[in-house]
Amino acid sequence: MFSKPAAPQPQKSWPERFEALAREAKNPLLKRFYKTGCVSADTPLSKVPMVAIDFETTGLDPSQHSIVSVGMVPFTLKSIELAEAHHWIVRPRQPLSQASIEVHGITHSDIDHAPDIEDILPTMFKLMNGRIAVVHFRAIEREFLDVALQYRFGEGITFPVIDTMAIEAHLHPDRRPTRWQQFFGKKPVSIRLADSRIRYRLPHYPSHNALVDALATAELLQAQILHHFSPETPIGDLWL
Amino acid sequence: MQAELIDIRNHLANFPPFDDMPEELLNQVVNSIEVEYFRAGTQILNFGEANHWLYYVRSGAVEVFRRSGELYNRVGEGGVFAQFSLLLSNRVRFPAKALEDTLVYRIPHEVFQHLFENDENFADFVEIEDSSRLRSAVSRREKSSLMTSRVTRLINRTPVCAPCTIRLQEAARIMTEQGVSALLLMDETRQPAKLTGIVTDKDLRTRALTEALPPETCIGDIMSEGLVTTNSKAFIFEAMLTMLHNNVHHLPIMDRDEVRGVIALSDIVKHESQNSLYLVSNIFHQHTVKGLKKVSLDVRNSFVRMVNEDANSHMIGSAMAGIGRSFTQRLLELGEEKLGPPPVPYCFMAMGSMARDEQLVVTDQDNAMILDDSFDPEQHDDYFLELARFVSDGLAECGYTYCTGDIMATNKHWRQPLQVWKHYFTDWIENPKAQALLNSNIFFDLDGIYGQTEFAEELKTLIAEKASSSQRFLTLMARNALNRTPPIGFFRNFVLEKDGQHRNSFNLKRRGTAPLSDLIRVHALACGSRAQNTFDRLEAIGKTKLLLDDDLGNLRDALEFIAIVRIRHQALDIEHGREPDNNVNPEDLSPFERSHLKDAFQVVSNAQKFLRFRYNAQVGRNVQ
């Protein structure tokens, strides 16, 4: 006789967490967001409403850097709606650094008259309510939004995301060639957004604009699902 | 439309029926788009199912089938499908399947309806779609995409830019990292930053490495001056001509003041490896006259191909002139390699049809050299004579026969310092003599094609300044322009050669295009224009009140028509293995061509009458 190894303590599922958070949240925007709820983990991808989100930021550390622009586009496996696409430039709390200007091209004069992110939150939440967020590299959007809300409302936010970069990383576990392989000319596999798109023969888009990157991410997820998963794959397999 | 979606709009604007659509309608289209990705082999539309979308292929390829399963059409990037179901009862008539991984933009039925009602072009495009039109459109696109596709189609990445203040080594590092052969340099003191120059692999090689510049040299010091760019609306063909004309291999594409991308000669070569440009890049890869001669055998094929692709005379004339320039430039490079660097700076100049960008396949060489004023014949002339001989003999090998009038740089008269050239032109213009002008007519079409081309520009300026104020010069030029008359009789019949080898034919160059360019040259000189191409000259004349707009339009049409008949005639000769010439027998022309040629000749004849009157150029009146 032997005993089964103990299963890892299952974390509470996202729908349950949303229920709990809906009770705790004080800010009405957050309360509404959690109350609208979250699809259950067994929902097939074809039935999941999603929203691709991309932030351009002044740097990579949410505790030190700020959001400078936001791009969002709601979509499903069958359709990305450009009519609902949104793009905002927002005023960061820290001054822009030269290095970040070179990446996203947003300059001091652009942000002089830009709103604070607080002003656009109602519309952002309208797009997020009931939809699963899709990002390329999950360390940015969820974390930055969490910090921005803590700073303004005194309470943060959490939600499931689908990370198209994590999917690429999973598909290419050996993407960094050994020195030996490098010697024979093997090139590393890049999982950056633009490079990942090439593998699915998606067209070239100019990068480092939040809306274009959000759109590019949405298209990439459609392609990833059709190539490596299926419309019936449950969302629980992909969200993080 | 969100401004960030401009890339999507620009993509649509490259392809019919969206290419001529007003911006506002196009924005509505972009705003309504839904995007969907299909894997290769996936069925997109099934027969009989409901459909409420027009499909636009952003990337990939789709096959459209008849109900029988027979392939009806293949739609690639920029193509649309499913329009029939929108026109007829919203049921799919032609099923569609993704042939490759495909990204489609779907345009909803309401927007389709709106376009259909408000844009005639769009309505025609989706309605008159029958299989024959489709087939011809498809084959046409494959054949002549250079003439019908815009340069933006060749842009495949965001432009790589850097401030023009960075160091040489940094520039090289960026270019290597980004894998580009050209780097755009921006003046960042301007808001927004403005494109000021470009540096290419070749610049790094020829300017930085050969001169062993230190890595901390400012990149601005070696960047190419006189930046050549083109507009994002330009056709690939026009971009190619711009590159040929300026002898550059990279061309930034501009959208007003903003850079959209850079295209390289090799992009166009890849796009259409069978065309005249391929030939040009081949020319620059040859290292011997023998190699060049081999390449020159392709010039005629290239010419015939362009004629069959329905290029107009301006395109063909420019492309052939571009090829001629390239041969000359390459020969000069080879000559300098052989003889060593020139002892003093010089400019190699083309005259006549090459300078006018109106060269065809039957052509001789007309060229000259302008030497720096420090030129000392005792010391330096041996070198330049040797170089001129090398080029001239090389051109002859490549099919550009020696000039019978000896207007070549091998002739001592036409191998002189700038001061002497200025003196020549001043003398021709201020002390004109009929016979001397007849011989020097050809020098009034000139263009610097190699070396210090600014020497040639100085001569153009001198001509533009002096010619318009010398009435006697204009009168004599006009009189010379009347020497050759169109072959049309009083009763609108063709006047044919009575004897000789070309009996019963007429010469389309001598009696058609040449008298036209002669008389247009006189008007252009009179209004102080620096243009060399006859169409450009007409445009310059149009800006003055010298000729009526109607007359200008007639001249333009007549020139195009006579030129294109001449070109087609030569292409036909080549295809039938005959030696092409300029002689046409009216019986070989279609009734359409005959009738229009008569009209065109009538235009030439009337224009000559006006010229005679305008410049007081009656033959026999004593002006000397």
Image: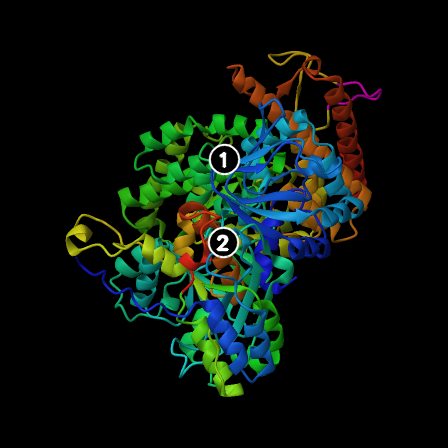
Percent coordinates x, y for residue B68 in the rendering: 61, 22
Residue A212 falls inside the magenta stretch? no
Residue type beneath disc 2: Leu
- On screen, residue A214 above or below B65: below
* The image quarter in which residue B172 lies: bottom left
- Dividing the image into 4 quarters, which one contains the C terminus of chain A? bottom left
- On screen, residue A139 above or below B121: below
Percent coordinates x, y for residue B491 in the rendering: 84, 20
Magenta segment boundaries in residue numbering: B487-494
Between B604 and B271, the one lying in front of the other is: B271
Question: What residue sits right under mark 1 in the picture?
Answer: B99
Residue type beneath disc 1: Leu
- Residue B479 in view (yes/no): no
Residue neighbourhood size for the residue with mark 1, other residues' Cα within 10 Å, grouped as few (<14), some (14–19), many (≥20)? many
Same chain check for tags 2 and 1: no
Q: Which mark is residue A45?
A: 2
